[in-house]
Amino acid sequence: MFLHYLKVAFRNIRKQKMYAAINVGGFAIGIAACLLIALFIQHETSYDSANPNRHHIFRLVGEAKQNGQVHSGIAFPAPMSKAILNDFPEVEKAGRIMSNSLFGAANNQVRRPDQQNNTYEQGFAFADTSTLEILDIKMIYGSRTEALKQPFSVILNKSMADKYFPNQNPVGQRLIFNDNPRLPIIVGGVMEDFPTNSHLQYRGFISLAGVSFWDNEQSQWTASNYDIYLQLKPNTNIASFEKKMTDDVVDKYMVPAMVAGGQKNAKESFKDTRIYLQPLSDIHLYSYNIEQDDTRHGDIRFVYLFAAIAAFILLLACINFLNLSTARSANRAKEVGVRKVMGGSRNNLINQFLSESLLYSFLSFLTGTAIAVLALPLFNKVSGLYLSMPWKEWWLIPALIGGALVIGLLAGIYPAFYLSYFKPINTLKGNLSLGSKNGRLRSSLVVFQFSISVVLLIGTAVIYKQMQYILNSKIGFDKDQVLMIEGADALKEQTTSFKNEVLNLPVVKNVSVSDFLPVNDTKRNGNTFWEEGKQQDDGFALQHWVVDENYIPTLGMKLIAGRNFSKDFHTDSSTAVVNKALADKLGIKDPIGKIITNGGEHLRIIGVVDNFYFESMKQQVTPLCMVLGNSNSIVSIKIKGADMKTALATIEAKWKAFLPNQPMRYTFLDERYAAMYIDVQRMQYIFTGFSILAVVVACLGLFALAAFMAEQRTKEIGIRKVLGASVAGVFTLLTKNFLKLVGLSLIISIPVGWWLMNQWLQDFSYRISLNWKIFAFASLLMMTIALFTICFQAIKAAIANPVKSLRTE
Amino acid sequence: MIELKHISKWVTIGGKPNFILKDVNATVNEGEFLSIMGPSGSGKSTLLNVIGMLDEFNEGEYRFFHEEVHKMKEKQRSNLYKQYIGFVFQAYHLIDELTVYENIETPLIYQDVKSSERKAMVADILDRFNIVGKKDLFPTQLSGGQQQLVGIARALIARPKLILADEPTGNLNSKQGEEIMNLFKQLNDEGVTIIQVTHSEKNAAYGKRIIHLLDGRIEREE
C-alpha cells in the first residue's frame, strides 16, 4: 500500500515539475537554514559542558546601581578569593585569573633565550593553581598542582609549546618575555588547548605566586583586577550564600578598607551592591550585560532570535506546501472521487496524501542537508564560528529523519484532511468550485508569510543603518589613514629617535606614541579621581591615559577649550587634557585650571577635547583624562595622502633600520575600530542572509499561487478579452488581489518591526532614530519584489490568445 | 436485490422544494440488465447515484439485499457498495498517474487483497479484455474506447454483484460503443447484474428492461 502511495507521489512530482520544485526548493531552503542555526545553537549551548564539576562552579559577578542604572563587573580585589575561602565552609576551592594588560597579562613579546627575534603572543593571564583545578585544566606535561607553584613560571597551551619547543617536553625550559633576560619565565607545564566551546580561550597561564604588581597589591581591597571562580560544596543554598558572601565582603573588608583610605560614608556607597554567583555553564550566553569582561561571549538573545528566524523560515515553507496543495486541489479532486468509489476509505486517502507530503519532506531534507553542508563554510565565515556537521554523532541521522517526519506531517496534515474530505459525487460531476473555497485561509497565510518577510527586511535595514551610523558618524577622532605599529616597546630608549625620524618622512603627517587608543585591545586604566578640595566620596571613575604631545593632533581630536600639551611648558608633566564628559561630570562650565586628584596625583586641567568614543557605542562615553608620559608599545602614524602602499614601505624600511630582528607588526586604526563592532556586522550579515531566504521562500509560494490562479482563470480571462478587456485590464485584475495581500502584510508588519527594532536599538547608547524612510524602503522593496514575482504569470495570462484558452475549455 | 420505495429527493430553491426524484418505486432482481432512459435533467443519473449509494435521498426506503440502506450511516453504506458494486463512468475517470495495470489493481489494494493474488486477478482480466499489451501504458496514451475498456475492467476486478454504468458510451464513437455494449451483454449473460443510464434507444435495447424517467418520476416501464 505504502509503495503504491509512493509511486503515485513520485509520478505526481514528475508531472508537476514546477510546483514540485517550488515545494522542495522552499522546504530545502528552510531546512538548510534550520540546520545551520541548529548547529549554531548546539555549539552556543555546549559551552563549558565538559567540566565534570560544572554544576558547582561559579564565577563571581558584582552588581551595583548608579543613578538608577545597573552596572555589572567581574573584577574583584586581590585578597578577596582567599577571604571567601577562609570565611565560608561552603567554598571548596577559590581561584583567581588576572588578565589586565597593564600588568603583563594579555600580550607579551616572547622568545627562547637562544632566539633573536621576538614573537608577539596573545592570550596570557595570571592564575592561581586552584583556578586550574576548578577549571579542570588538562595537562600534557607537568603536574597541575606543581606547574604554577614557583614565581615566574608559566603553563603554555599545546600549540604555543609546539611553537617554541617542538617535539619535546619543555618543562623546566626558559622563555624570555618582553626582552627582559634578567627575569626569564620558566615553563612549568603544558596544557591542552581550550576547546572552542570554552568561555576562556587563554593560551598561557602565568603564576600568581609571589606576585605583587605594586606595594601591598595582594592585600589591597581598593583595587579590583581579579576574576574569581569558586567551586562550592554540593547542596549549597546559592541564594543565601550570595547574601552572606556579599555582606561579609562588604562589611568585613571593603568598607573598613575604604574608611581607612579616607572615605567617610563608604557603607552608604555599597547600599545597592550585590555579589552573585554565575554558574559556569551560563557564562557564555548570559554575560552580555557585564561590562569590562574581556572574554568574547555569545548572547542568549541571539540564540533565541536565530531560533525564531529558523522556525519562521521553515514555517513559511510549510505554508507554501499547504497553500499549493489546497489551491491545486482541483487537480486531485477527481482522483479522490475515483479512489473513493473504487473502495478507498478516507483513511486510505489521508495516508496517501501524508505519504506524499512525507516524500516531499524527505526529498527536501536531502536537498536541505546538502545545501547546509555547502553553505557551512560561508556561514562559519560570516558568524565567526568553527562549526562542522556532526556526522559522527549517533543522533544526527535519527534527528534528520525525525525532523523530516515531523515536517512532513505538519505540512501535510491539513491538505490531507482537506483533500480526503471531497465527496465523490461532487468531484466526479466536476462541479465542485474548487480552489476558491479556502481562499480566505490561503490569503491569511500569504499575509502571514509576507509579514514575516517584511519584519526581517525592516530588521536588516535598521541594522544596516545603525552599522553605517557607527562607521561613519562623528566619533570624536579621525580613524582614517592611521597606522598602528605594535610591539614598539622593543625600541626601548630609541623610541624617541624612531618617532622623530618617522615624523620627518614626507609621507607622514604626524606620529604619536601611546598604548592608549580608542579601539579594543589597547590599554585602559580606570581610577577613582575627585576634584581637589572635595571629598573622596564625590569621586568618580576616570580613565587615566598616558599619551604624548602629538597624540591629539595625530588622532584628529578636537580641542574645545584650553590647549594641547606642549614642549614649551615644562610644567606639563602634572597637567591633563580631559574629555568633555569629565567637564560635564565636574559640572563646571570652564574647567581649565581646576585640579583633579586621586590622592597621589594632582593634575591641573589645561585643555578639554570633544568626547570621542573609546568603548563600544553601546556604552556612554565616560570621563577620561590624558597626561603626558611614557607608554611606548604602540606608535600611531598619521599618513599623508592616499598612497598607503608607499607610505607603508617607507615606514617599514625605517623600522628595519632600527629593529632588524623584529618584524613590524601593524594594523590600521579604522579596521580596529570596525572590529569593535564585529558582532553588529555579523548580525547584519546573518540577518541579511536569512531575510533574503525568507523573502525567497515567500516569493516562491507567491509565484506558484499566481501561476495557479492564472491557470484557474484562463477561461474567465478568455471571456473578458473577447468582451473587450485590455491587456492592462487583465493584468490589473490578476495582480490587484495579491498586491492587496502584500499591502495588508505591510500594515501588520511595520508596527511589529518598529517595536522589535526599537528594542534592539536600546542596546546602543548612541543610535539612529527610526524614521519613516526605513519603513518606506522596506515596503517599496517588498512591493516591487512581489509585483515582479507575479507579473510574469499575469503578463503571460493577459497576452494569451483568448480563442486558444476558450477552445481548450 | 434492490428495492426502492417512495424515493424522493429535492433541493430547496427560493423556499420551494424542487424535486429531482419524486416517489420512485422500483425493484431490481439479481441477473437483470436494466436501462434507465430519459431526457437531460430527468433525474436518471441521480437515481443511479442513489442506487450506487454515492448520493443521498430525502425520503423513502431503500433495501439492498434486504439491508435497509436508508437507516445506515455513511460508513456502513460505503462498505456495502465497495463490496457489491462496480462503477463505470461516461468520462472513464481513470487515474492519470497510474498505468492501465495499476488502475485495475487499485480496488484490490483497497480491499487488502494479497499481492500474488492481485497479480493473478489483474492478469486474468487483462487477458480476458485483450489488453495485456497495453498494461504499462498510461490512460492518456489510450483511445477513448480502450480507456472505457480499462474502466470496465477496473469495475469488474473485485467481482461485484452489480455494475452501475452512467452513459458508458457517451464519449465514444458508435463502433466503440457497440463493442462496449456487447461486453455488457456478455457480462450479464455470465450473471452480473447491470444498471445503465443512457440517452440512446439503441443502447437501451441491450437491457432486458427499460425504465423511462421524466421530471424525476418513473413515466413508464417496458
Image (cartoon, grey):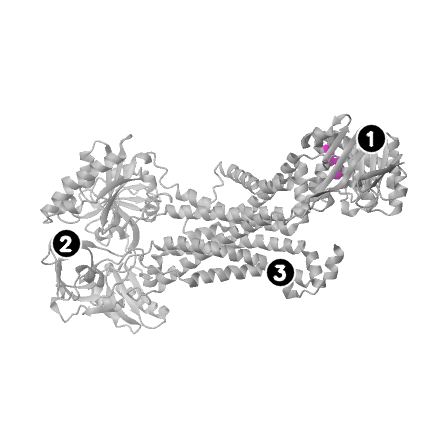
Tally the marks.
3
In this orientation, which residue lies closer to the viewer: A88 or B9? B9
Q: Is residue A688 visible?
A: no
Q: Are marks 3 and 1 on the same chain?
A: no
Q: Chain of mark 3?
A: A
| Measured Cα–Cα span from mark 3 to mark 1 | 55 Å
Residue B105 in magenta stretch: yes
The local secondary structure at tag 3 comes to: helix
Q: Position of residue A288 (x, y in %)?
A: 33, 48
Closer to the camera: disc 1 or disc 2? Answer: 1
Identify the residue position indicated by label 2 in the image.
A538
Q: Amino acid at mark 2?
A: Asp
Q: Quadrant of residue B96?
A: top right
Q: Which residues are magenta?
A: B102-108
Quadrant in which the C terminus of chain B is drawn: top right
Picture disc at residue A733 = 3
| Measured Cα–Cα span from mark 1 to mark 2 | 110 Å
Identify the residue position indicated by label 1 in the image.
B27
Q: Amino acid at mark 3?
A: Leu
Q: Quadrant of residue B204?
A: top right
| Measured Cα–Cα span from mark 3 to mark 2 | 73 Å
